[in-house]
Amino acid sequence: MIALHVRQKWLIASLFSLASLLAQNESDEQALVRLTNQGISFSQDSSFLLNLRFRMQNRFGYLSQLDDTTAPGFDIRVRRLRVRLDGFILTPRLSYYIQLSFSAADQDFVEGFALNIVRDAMIYYTISRSFYLGFGQGKLPGNRQRVISSGNLQMPERSYASQFYTLDRDVGVFLYGILEAGKQQIRIKAALTGGEGRLSDLPNTALAYTGRIEYLPFGTFQNTGDYSEGDLEYELEPRLSLGLSYCMNQDAQRVGGQLGRPLNFPADIQTLIVDGVFKYRGWALSGEAFWRHVQSEHPTDPSIQSIYTGYAWNVQFSKVFWRRHEICLRYTEVNPLPSFHFLQAKWRSKGVGYSYYIKGHRVKAQLYGGLDDRSATRGAHSLRNRVSVIFQMEFGI
């Protein structure tokens, strides 16, 4: 832990040193520093740009009893603390994206793995107006709610369906393309990755293959609103986006494919996702459905049976009032295969959220209340239904 704190302090000091250096004179040229919609922007000339942003999520919550052995407790922590760097070098066609996380709850630590400070480390090359390539570590083209930044969510956390069945981040090569026909737009995304997630030291005996297609029949959303929850832009015309994703993670080494504890034996994990979002005049409706299948030579191994296998879905409905206030309703189901109920819980989650947007998604206050109905038996302890109340502040640039 001491080494972790030293590393975090060193990274923060390095970022501020970099900002100071860029703001100074170099040779006979003056660095330009501006505050833009992309954060604090540093540029030397047309051959270099760096945008610096930060954000934090501070939380105070209450969770009722989880099972026969636990007592009610409070969830008080810095849920997320992140620094983001992006820009280009030499030419705008060669860009980069870096995101670092510093809160303990945001580093995805599991037994057998190091703390993960690096969330994203991507290099992009723009081939044409419609196609570009990515290389490095970033989000796979999976379900919409997972790809949406946690800073642009309507509620403090993603749904349980997303948490159990998401594809998350991985390291490899990414391809993005856009096809247009009038107002209509088709987006194609594909990735060839290692399959073991963020900064994994596990050997890659096979690869993961991920593809996604999106269809926007009525044209694009304002300010990429199809990847931001709630209709804060107040679309004056109906906007709809439908998506389909598929991932084959061969010889996966972790319970969640790119996430979770190590498996005792490798498994092939197939994940199919269908999602969509509709927005119009402050109203928003979004939903996604998951299906996951696992194939292994050791199907009875406890680690293999810990993989959430089955189907799940989530739907959210919201309305923005007076451009600052929003009410959102959520319903989620997680349905593992019947033969896996001993190790996996069946979830029915209902939630209501209120958000007050001070400066869009970047500065906001959120209040959430939820009821989680869970049915399963794990050993000698049965799961109980859970009530949760969370207040969270998002603050960033």
Image (cartoon, rainbow, N blue to C red):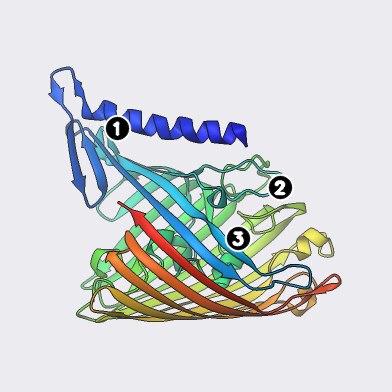
Q: Can you identify the residue that label 3 sits on?
A: 248
Crowding around mark 3 (Cα neighbors within 10 Å: few <14, some 14 to 19, many 20+) is: many
Disc with the residue nearer the chain's start (2 vs 1): 1
**Where in the figure is residue 207, as x and y percent of width and height?**
61, 50
- Rendered position, 344 above or below 168: below
User: Quick one: 146 or 360, which is closer to the camera?
Assistant: 360
Q: Quadrant of residue 83?
A: top left
Nearer to me, 166 or 12: 12
Q: Where residue 359 sits in the image (x, y, percent)?
A: 26, 62
Given the image, on which type of amino acid does mark 3 rest? Met
Distance, label 1 to label 3, CA atoms, is: 41 Å
Disc with the residue nearer the chain's start (3 vs 2): 2
| In the displayed structure image, the side of residue 324 where residue 296 appears, left or right | right
Single out the mark in the foreground, 3 or 2. Answer: 2
Q: Residues within 10 Å of mark 2 (few under 14, many from 20)?
A: few
Q: Which residue is mark 2?
A: 111
Residue 23 vertical position relative to residue 54 in the rendered view, above or below: above
Residue plotted at (30% across, 46% down): 126
What residue is disc 1 on?
Answer: 19
Q: Using a 10 Å C-alpha cutoff, classify the residue at mark 1 as few (fewer than 14 neighbours), some (14 to 19) or many (20 or more).
A: some
Whether residue 57 is visible:
yes
What residue is drawn where x is 39% and y is 62%? 188
